[in-house]
Image (cartoon, rainbow, N blue to C red):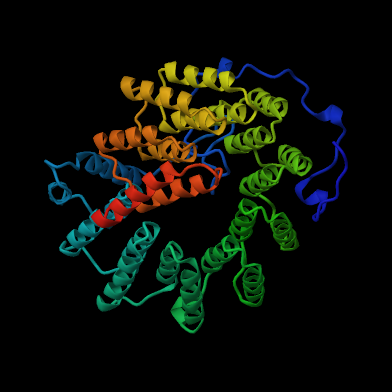
Amino acid sequence: MTSISLPFTSSFLQISPSPNSSRISTPIPTFTHYYPCSHSRIRMCGVPTRPDDKPGPKRTPKKRTSSSSDVENLVRLMVRSFSDKAPLLSTLNKYVKFVRTEHCFLLFEELGRSDKWLQCLEVFRWMQKQKWYVADNGVYSKLISVMGKKGQTRMAMWLFSEMRNSGCKPDTSVYNALITAHLHSRDKSKAIAKSLAYFEKMKGMERCKPSVVTYNILLRAFAQAKNVDQVNALFKDLDESIVTPDIFTFNGVMDAYGKLGMIREMELVLARMKSKQIKPDIITFNSLIDAYGKKQEFDKMEQVFKSLLRSKEKPTLPTFNSMITNYGKARLREKAGLVFEKMTEMGYKPSFVTYECIIMMYGYCDCISKARDIFDEMSESEKEKKVSTLNAMLEVYCMNGLPLEADMLFESVRASGTFSIDSSTYKLLYKAYTKADMKEMIQKLLVYMDKDGIIPNKRFFLDALGAFGSSSSGKKSTGRKSGLRQLESTEKTGKV
């Protein structure tokens, strides 16, 4: 590897140039050799916000107290009991002697994750009728957070008003939840303006002073909006306050800059983190590896990876998934293979996402048959089938100009029921068929969607029309006209 100069010292991340001979020099592995494997909980090829995936060596799990375990078990039991025959309120009344505030907190989280935010309000109303209920900022803060994540900003504002009417006084956590709710709204410029207003208001209230969490939320939001000046101003404000930044402060901003390809800004934040004597953790390493990989700055990516191996931190599966994907996008199949080999040598078991990354890597490298071999191995495995695996193979066909092959695979899977097809599959194919201007296949897809009870919203068609816009402008736009007609129909029926 050639020597390069980074904007931060090599000792901080333990990065040091090394000769080419230090690289792994093993042959490209046969990827299917390692399947089947235990499934990881990773959900994407990129770097997650927290390291859910554990490295190869086993770790001793944290012991839970019996009370927390009992709470979780009861909540799981109740969630499984919800149905048309046993509605939410009936289930709550069935367990009324056992359910308390802590159970409701977990219910809010579970219902929020499954987009059942209206049922969160049902639980809340039920809580208010119980003798043990006491109006509490924590309950409102949790509900405001759930509503915000689901884009229900008005409902979050209503809960804030409801909280004050109940006699509770807002505190920092409530305002943090409210700021987060606004930042999830579609109008980002308006959301940032609102959040800044709340931030300034918090400074003037003794019980609502901004905390490090407040700064972390705002810094990440400004970085995502590419507002570098505001990020720097907020860092300055943080330096002048009594609040001490933590690792999440810098990781959030670096991850946002990295995903936007703003490498120089990301490196300046890393230098700022060093000046605060805060050591990088696995999220720091993963963010840097992913950012450099996406920009195809592979020398820097490899330096950070070597530094990670020398540090006290351990790689996670997303570390390897990211490198495989980004090498694949650069059509560096051999290097992607060496990463996979290194991963298995270190005792890591590939997850289904790892194999999806390999499928995509082969797709980028025009190795369609090899991608299909991996897909077939996964399809024939007794492990649980993920629709994301099907989507990866379909995308490989579509990106290589093979929509007919994608259609054949889709028809086969739909007939066999091997994978549970959802709206994400239809959206992927709709975009591909629209871009290829294949009117008959678009119409057939819409018929299937109707049969499967999948109702497309406005965003579905706008994304598809955007894909068409990236194709040749000289083509006859039958697919585009079909999409426009469907969009008009959607707006009239109110299915948005």
- The number of discs equals 0
Left or right: where 70 falls relative to 61: left
Residue 453 location (% of width, % of height): 25, 39
Residue 154 location (% of width, % of height): 32, 68
**Residue at 30% across, 50% down:** 111
**Residue at 45% across, 66% down:** 187
Q: Residue furthest bottom?
A: 204
**Residue at 68% across, 51% down:** 280
> Can residue 39 be seen in the rendering of this structure?
no
Residue 120 drawn above or below residue 59: below
Residue 421 location (% of width, % of height): 35, 32
Residue 412 location (% of width, % of height): 37, 20
Left or right: where 320 falls relative to 140: right
159, 397: nearer the viewer? 397
For the C terminus, the image quarter is bottom left
115, 271: nearer the viewer? 115
237, 20: nearer the viewer? 20
> Can residue 257 be seen in the rendering of this structure?
yes
Left or right: where 256 falls relative to 206: right
For the N terminus, the image quarter is top right
Residue 6 drawn above or below residue 320: below
